[in-house]
Image (cartoon, rainbow, N blue to C red):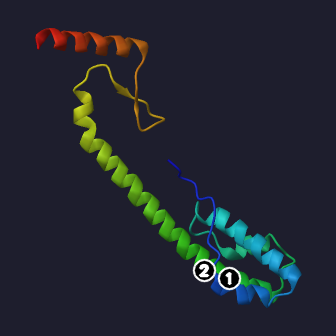
Amino acid sequence: MQTEKNGFVFYFDNLPILMSLPSEQRGWVIAALCRYAQEVWQNPDFPVEQAMGEFPALSGEGEVACRFMGAAVLRDTKRWLHQRDYRMQRRQHQLEASAPARKQVPGLSPDPNRQVYRETPEEYLKRLEWMAERAREG
């Protein structure tokens, strides 16, 4: 399951703003936005000004453009975080709801690193013995 954000959306509505800047400033704005998007999903309180501070060559116009586009990055990131949390909660609820069915088979234990059950060789033998006993009974 992916839990890291690996990109951000650039809207075509922002293109006229970006194109109005000198070509050198366009690159700095995009770099600052990338830096901001990289940090803001981990800390939604991360200020766009801090990301812009890492690029001292940004002009006043570039800073305005970066703040404007950064607001959309923040909005989209908050939406993404909400959706990610919702999906994780839903997945956890589904696992908990189906857990009793899994517990009926002795010897299975959850692998904490994955959302599937893995067996040790000992657990596999216990399960085979249980299945053989069930076959004899029924």
- Residue 107 falls in image quadrant: top left
| In this rendering, position of residue 108 left or right of residue 46 | left
Going by the picture, which residue comes out furthest to the left? 138
Q: Are marks 2 and 1 in contact (CB under 8 Å)?
A: yes
Inter-mark Cα distance, 2 to 1:
6 Å
Q: Which one is in front, 123 or 131?
A: 131
* Residue denoted by label 2: 71
Q: Quadrant of residue 135?
A: top left
Quick check: can you spot residue 120?
Answer: yes
Q: Residues within 10 Å of mark 2 (few under 14, many from 20)?
A: few
At horizontal 62% and vertical 58% (from top left) the residue drawn is 6
Q: Image point 62% across, 72% down: which residue?
A: 9
Callout 1: helix, strand or loop? helix
Q: Position of residue 20 (x, y in %)?
A: 79, 91
Amino acid type, residue under disc 1 in the picture: Arg
Label 2: state its secondary structure: helix
Whether residue 18 sits left or right of residue 109 in the image: it is right
**Can residue 68 be seen in this snapshot?**
no
Q: Which residue is mark 1?
A: 67
Residue ID at (55%, 69%): 77
The amino acid beneath tag 2 is Ala
Q: Quadrant of residue 63?
A: bottom right
Quadrant location of the C terminus in the rendered image: top left
Q: Is residue 100 left or right of residue 85?
A: left
80 relative position to 54: left or right: left
41 relative to 71, above or below: above
Residue 88 coordinates in the image, percent (x, y): 41, 53
Can you say whether 33 is above or below 68 in the image?
Answer: above
**Crowding near the residue tagged with mark 1, few <14, some 14–19, many ≥20 C-alpha atoms within 10 Å:** some
Q: Nearer the viewer, residue 61 or 44?
A: 61
